[in-house]
Image (cartoon, helix red, strand yellow):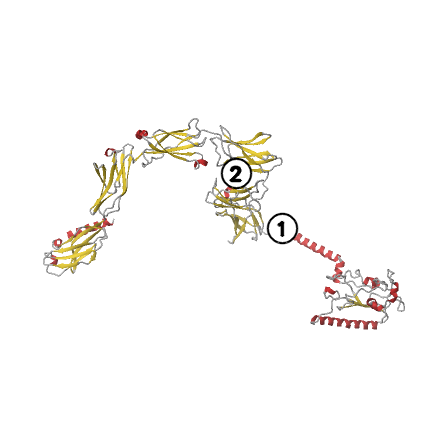
């Protein structure tokens, strides 16, 4: 394209030069000369501009000569002699397809007086990949082709030369842009050696290809053959005979030895890759035989031919099919049996497939399952498929499987029957997609057992059931397997792994998996079974298995009130309760279901909460309040009825001398209403510091009361002192108890005779913590050698004696007389004395 534009520009400038002139004589003022107007691309170029003496622009005036290269000014050198003036220019690297050099005479203004176009090009390069092929289909021709060399930028001629034994030469001119030629059959001989080459020439030089020597027949490509029949030979198992022919134009070549390639492939897809046969023959016959094929198997045959080893192959022929002769099935079958226990019979599911050693040896094969009993075989099931379910007795331990065809049957495959899978399962199981049509399964071996192998089972899950796809028997050392049989994207498959042991089958370990996931096809429809004023229950149905397209990860429920406030709830269940709703408000809700492959939104539904129901609040609130009140009243009445517990905390029981005896004052029965002491081994006691039954006047009685009050004040001061001092108070009367609780001491004072006394006028209680008796002191011994109980004291008068009953134990009567009152401080303090 650059070459065309530069040529057009040069022609335009030259036309302008011919139209220029000063009074019609400017065109004869100068001439531009160069060694050659065509140069090699990138070479150096020199040119000169000669100005004549009679040039009107150069007479009687000074002038300058200037050069332009494609309208760009360039510098040149000028020389002057006696006859004419000359200017020269030199270009070191001519790197354009063409240039227009123009010469100017300048006298203030510059005018072009001469010009010359110089073109550049490349030497021709040799064509490559010259090849020839003979076509024997009428009209017969010799077709040759080559790859042309690079563009030379200048006109280039191609010619095809053909010679035979240096005696016969033919030249063919090739049009520009053409790189092939066809020679008619009359110009060459099929079985004579010949030589061909291509020649390239332009103004700068020429080049030729490497000569190609060949015999036209050896370069002939035969037409596609035709297979007429594929038949077995009678009495020869596993053999097929193929009958073929060439086209009518080439049928004469059937008598020559041709090289044949025959391709046989079983029609059965499971055997196509394993039993493909490719064989080559050199035959001059119209029949080709091939043996050692599978028995009773349908084969698809194709063939192609060529003249010699270096000759081109013909195209593959048409496809033809044929069956080999049948034979009884051979080899074992791979089986997988599972048992479901029943009340009287066991249900057995049995699946099988051909092993690598099994050969059906016929097209029509059926299978028989049977049980042996008492040396007799009883058939259970017969099918053409590879899967059956039947019932057997619980006593059956083995079943057998045979393959049959029209010729015979195979040896039986023995299958053990294990009643149930109770052994240890695999420790782990995971399934990952491997492309869109395969699943990669990984599992861990059992932790405490050594299996003899594994069974991998694949089932396709439907809406209400599942269908068996395939199973694989794996080695004990395997921990992974690739499942690709019948796997499709967006369909759920249950992958199960069972370990096999010598005594049975381990428990199943299963996983639901997809080879590829996407968003579900449909979204659940929201229902509102219950709507209240402040909350509402939403529920929906599960998506059918065939519409899920993946494992459901969860549901999101979006709801929006009338003000545009939006809330989101997430759940894995098929229902949810929306709480904290506004009464009598319209809400919009939608549900979004998600899988790892995408999410899908359901349609928007409307719901409106109910208004607040006052009657319902009353019907619920009043019974609730009444019930709470009744419970509170029952608890209160129960508490008040238990007066012993109430008296224990509200008012302690004060001993009444008129209605009790001294013996009861020291027993547990006296203080049964007092609060219990924590961590104490004894019951609480009330210690009496002084007990007097005296006759006092009213004045004396007031004095005694005042004296006791002063004593109580001193006890309180001592108690405060101990509480604020760093010294420890006196030890607890309970020894190790250390509770520091006050021991109640009391003094009873009566102002008249005992029998005539009204209720005691004064009961003075001390808050002192000083124990009456130290814990380590033993109980006061009885004067009669036993621990005595206090008995009733009968007071006759101030002159009468104090009478105590004797101890029931008569032992130690003599010791009684020897005891002193000082040895019994408690009894001594309770002595009835006169004031």
Q: List the single residue furthest toward the right.
A: 799
Q: Residue at x 22, y 54 (%)?
A: 93
Horizontal placement of 227 versus 216: left or right?
right
762 or 12, nearer to the observer: 12
Horizontal placement of 685 versus 339: left or right?
right
Q: Is residue 66 above or below residue 765?
A: above
Which comes before the other along the chain, label 2 or label 1? 2
The residue pinned by badge 2 equals 467
Instruction: Please name which of the two marks, 2 or 1, marks the residue nearer to the observer.
Output: 2
Q: Is residue 729 above or below residue 15?
A: below
The residue pinned by badge 1 equals 616
Horizontal placement of 309 versus 809: left or right?
left
Q: List the single residue furthest toward the top.
A: 234
Q: Alpha carbon of mark 2 to alpha carbon of mark 1: how far?
A: 54 Å
Q: Where is residue 399 shown, x and y percent of the image?
A: 56, 34
Q: Where is residue 216 shown, x and y percent of the image?
A: 27, 35
Horizontal placement of 258 versus 771: left or right?
left
702 or 452, nearer to the observer: 452
Whether residue 819 is visible here, answered yes or no, is: yes
Rate crowding at label 2 as few (under 14), some (14 to 19) or many (20 or more) other CA atoms within 10 Å.
few
Q: Quadrant of the C terminus?
A: bottom right
On residue 765, the disc is: none
Whether residue 544 is visible here, answered yes or no, is: no
Q: Where is residue 353 shown, x and y percent of the image?
A: 50, 36
Element under disc 1: helix
């Amino acid at each position: 394209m650059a070459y065309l534009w530069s040529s057009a520009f040069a022609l335009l400038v030259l036309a302008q030069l011919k139209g220029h002139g000063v009074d019609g004589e400017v065109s004869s003022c100068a001439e531009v000369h160069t060694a050659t107007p065509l140069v090699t691309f990138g070479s150096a170029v020199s040119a000169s501009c000669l100005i004549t003496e009679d040039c009107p622009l150069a007479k009687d005036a000074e002038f300058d000569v200037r050069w332009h290269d494609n309208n760009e000014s360039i510098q040149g050198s000028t020389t002057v002699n006696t006859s004419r003036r000359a200017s020269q220019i030199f270009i070191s690297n001519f790197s354009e397809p063409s240039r227009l050099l123009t010469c100017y005479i300048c006298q203030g203004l510059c005018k072009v007086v001469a010009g010359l176009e110089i073109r550049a090009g490349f030497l021709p390069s040799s064509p490559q990949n010259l090849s020839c092929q003979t076509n024997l289909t009428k009209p017969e021709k010799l077709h040759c082709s080559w790859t042309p060399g690079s563009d030379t930028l200048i006109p280039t001629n191609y010619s095809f030369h053909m010679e035979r034994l240096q005696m016969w030469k033919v030249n063919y001119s090739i049009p520009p842009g053409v790189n092939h030629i066809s020679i008619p059959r009359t110009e060459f001989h099929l079985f004579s050696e010949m030589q061909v080459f291509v020649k390239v020439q332009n103004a700068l030089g020429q080049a030729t290809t490497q000569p190609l020597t060949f015999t036209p027949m050896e370069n002939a490509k035969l037409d596609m053959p035709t297979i007429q029949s594929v038949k077995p030979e009678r009495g020869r198992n596993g053999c097929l005979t193929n009958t073929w022919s060439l086209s009518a134009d080439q049928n004469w070549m059937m008598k020559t030895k041709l090289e044949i390639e025959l391709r046989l492939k079983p029609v059965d897809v499971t055997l196509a890759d394993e039993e493909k046969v490719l064989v080559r023959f050199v035959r001059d016959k119209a029949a080709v035989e091939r043996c050692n094929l599978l028995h009773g198997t349908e084969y698809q045959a194709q063939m192609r031919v060529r003249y010699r080893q270096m000759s081109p192959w013909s195209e593959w022929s048409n496809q033809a099919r044929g069956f080999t002769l049948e034979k009884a099935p051979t080899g074992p079958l791979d089986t997988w049996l599972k048992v479901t226990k029943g009340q009287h019979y066991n249900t057995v599911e049995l699946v099988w497939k051909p092993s690598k050693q099994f050969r059906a040896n016929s097209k029509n094969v059926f299978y028989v399952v049977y049980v042996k009993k008492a040396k007799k075989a009883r058939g259970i099931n017969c099918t053409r498929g590879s899967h059956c379910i039947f019932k057997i007795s619980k006593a059956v331990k083995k079943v057998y499987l045979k393959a049959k065809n029209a010729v015979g049957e195979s040896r039986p495959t023995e299958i053990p029957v294990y009643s149930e899978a109770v052994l240890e399962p695999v420790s782990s199981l995971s399934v990952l997609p491997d492309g869109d049509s395969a699943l990669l399964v990984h599992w861990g071996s059992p932790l405490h057992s050594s299996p003899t192998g594994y069974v991998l089972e694949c089932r396709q899950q439907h809406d209400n059931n599942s269908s068996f796809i395939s199973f694989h028997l794996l080695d004990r050392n395997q921990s992974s397997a690739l499942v690709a049989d019948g796997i499709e994207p967006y369909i759920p498959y249950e992958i199960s792994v069972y370990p096999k042991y010598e005594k049975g089958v381990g428990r199943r370990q299963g996983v639901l998996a997809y080879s590829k996931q996407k968003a579900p096809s449909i979204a659940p429809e929201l229902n509102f079974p219950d709507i209240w004023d402040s909350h509402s229950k939403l529920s929906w149905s599960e998506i059918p298995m065939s519409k899920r397209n993946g494992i459901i990860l969860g549901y999101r429920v979006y709801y929006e009130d009338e003000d545009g406030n939006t809330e989101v709830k997430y759940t894995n269940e098929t229902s949810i309760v929306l709480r904290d709703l506004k009464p009598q408000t319209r809400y919009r809700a939608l549900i979004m279901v998600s899988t790892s492959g995408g999410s899908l939104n359901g349609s928007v539904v409307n719901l409106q909460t109910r208004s607040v129901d006052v009657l319902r609040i009353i019907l619920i609130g009043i019974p609730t309040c009444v019930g709470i009140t009744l419970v509170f009243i029952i608890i209160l009445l129960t508490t008040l009825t238990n007066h012993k517990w109430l008296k224990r905390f509200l008012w302690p029981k004060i001993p009444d001398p008129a209605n009790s005896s001294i013996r009861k004052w020291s027993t547990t029965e006296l203080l049964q209403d007092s609060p219990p002491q924590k961590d104490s081994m004894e019951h609480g006691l009330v210690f009496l510091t002084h007990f007097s039954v005296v006759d006092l006047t009213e004045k004396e009685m007031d004095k005694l009361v005042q004296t006791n009050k002063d004593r109580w004040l001193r006890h309180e001061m001592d108690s405060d002192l101990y509480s604020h001092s760093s010294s420890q108070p006196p030890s607890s009367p309970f020894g190790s108890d250390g509770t520091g609780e006050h021991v109640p001491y009391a003094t009873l004072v009566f102002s008249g005779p005992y029998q005539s006394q009204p209720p005691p006028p004064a009961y003075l209680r001390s808050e002192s913590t000083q124990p009456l008796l130290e814990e380590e002191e033993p109980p006061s011994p009885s004067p009669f050698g036993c621990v005595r109980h206090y008995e009733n004291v009968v007071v006759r008068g101030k002159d009468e004696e104090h009478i105590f009953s004797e101890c029931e134990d008569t032992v130690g009567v003599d010791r009684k007389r020897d005891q002193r009152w000082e040895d019994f401080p408690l009894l001594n303090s309770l002595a009835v004395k006169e004031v």
